[in-house]
Image (cartoon, helix red, strand yellow):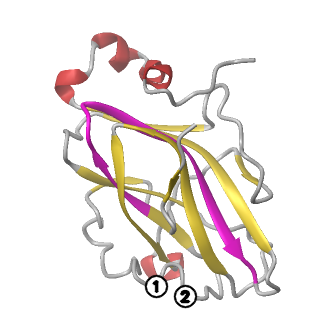
């Protein structure tokens, strides 16, 4: 299993299902289908995009500090940045949008302060991704934090992001993009 530390964050207005608080030393399973799949065609090799989700649990004592963001599995992508922001300042979250940092959000995503800033309220996290292959993706994102009492916590997002350049998408993939999960190694074998 490949782990890529991002050391930062992810943000989004997506209603992420399947998010679970986990102890920091427990590896989540990536068996079966992810809870949320984002699929898009327009990203060609070399293009960048931003993936976001919500942040730490609401019951984590504030202020808190983000300590890490880990992408659990990836294929054909490179993580090129991370950031965090106060969703009240932005007025919304970020799901999957072109560019890093995404146009219109760049002044509010505090990339440099992500791991040092104390967040008194809600905080959303983001990562910037560059496609390296015509078919690419990532799966499983873990956001870690330390709360006001010094208690560490983490939240796992069973999120898959799949991209397929127009020339690399077969009719079968366009009809059922979940076919890319095993092809890209983004699902653990059953058993």
What is the quadrant of the C terminus in the image? top right
Residue at 34% in and 50% down:
78
Classify residue 120 as left or right of residue 53. right
- The 10 Å Cα crowd at callout 2, few under 14, some 14 to 19, many 20 or more, is some
Q: Secondary structure at mark 2?
A: loop
Residue 2, above or below 151: above
User: Residue at the location (45% across, 18% down)?
Assistant: 179
Q: For this view, does 57 lie left or right of residue 115?
A: right
The magenta-colored residue range is 127-147
Tell me the residue at 43%/20% (across/down): 183
- How far across and down, in percent of the image, does residue 87 sit? 51, 75
Figure quadrant of the N terminus: top right
Query: x, y (%) of residue 97?
Result: 33, 54
Q: Which mark is residue 113?
A: 1
**In this view of the protein, can residue 134 be seen by the observer?**
yes
Q: From what the image shows, is residue 186 above or below residue 10?
A: above
148 in magenta: no
Q: Which of the 4 quarters of the picture holds residue 159?
A: top right
Disc 2 designates what residue? 117
Report the residue that reaches farthest toward the top.
172
Local secondary structure at mark 1: loop
Position of residue 131 in the picture relative to residue 16 (left or right): left
Does the stretch in magenta take in 143?
Answer: yes
- Image marks 2 and 1: residues in contact by CB distance under 8 Å: yes
Crowd class of label 1 (few under 14; some 14 to 19; many from 20; radius 10 Å): some
Q: Is residue 122 visible?
A: no
Q: Position of residue 110 (x, y in %)?
A: 41, 81
SS majority, magenta = strand
């Amino acid at each position: 299993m490949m782990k890529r530390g991002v050391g930062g964050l992810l943000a989004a207005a997506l209603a992420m299902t399947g998010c679970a608080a986990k102890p920091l030393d427990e590896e989540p399973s990536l068996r079966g289908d992810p809870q949320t799949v984002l699929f898009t065609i327009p990203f060609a090799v070399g293009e960048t995009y931003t993936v976001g989700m919500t942040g730490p649990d609401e019951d984590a004592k504030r202020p808190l500090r983000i300590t890490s963001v880990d992408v659990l599995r990836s294929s054909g992508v490179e993580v090129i940045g991370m950031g965090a922001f106060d969703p009240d300042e932005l007025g919304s979250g970020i799901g999957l949008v072109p560019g890093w940092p995404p146009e219109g959000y760049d002044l509010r995503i505090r990339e440099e302060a992500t791991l040092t800033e104390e967040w008194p309220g809600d905080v959303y996290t983001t990562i910037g991704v560059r496609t390296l292959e015509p078919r690419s993706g990532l799966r499983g994102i873990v956001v870690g934090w330390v709360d006001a009492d010094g208690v560490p916590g983490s939240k796992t997002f069973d999120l898959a992001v799949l991209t397929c350049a127009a020339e690399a998408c077969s009719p079968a993939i366009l009809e059922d993009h979940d076919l890319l999960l095993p092809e890209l190694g983004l699902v653990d074998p059953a058993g």
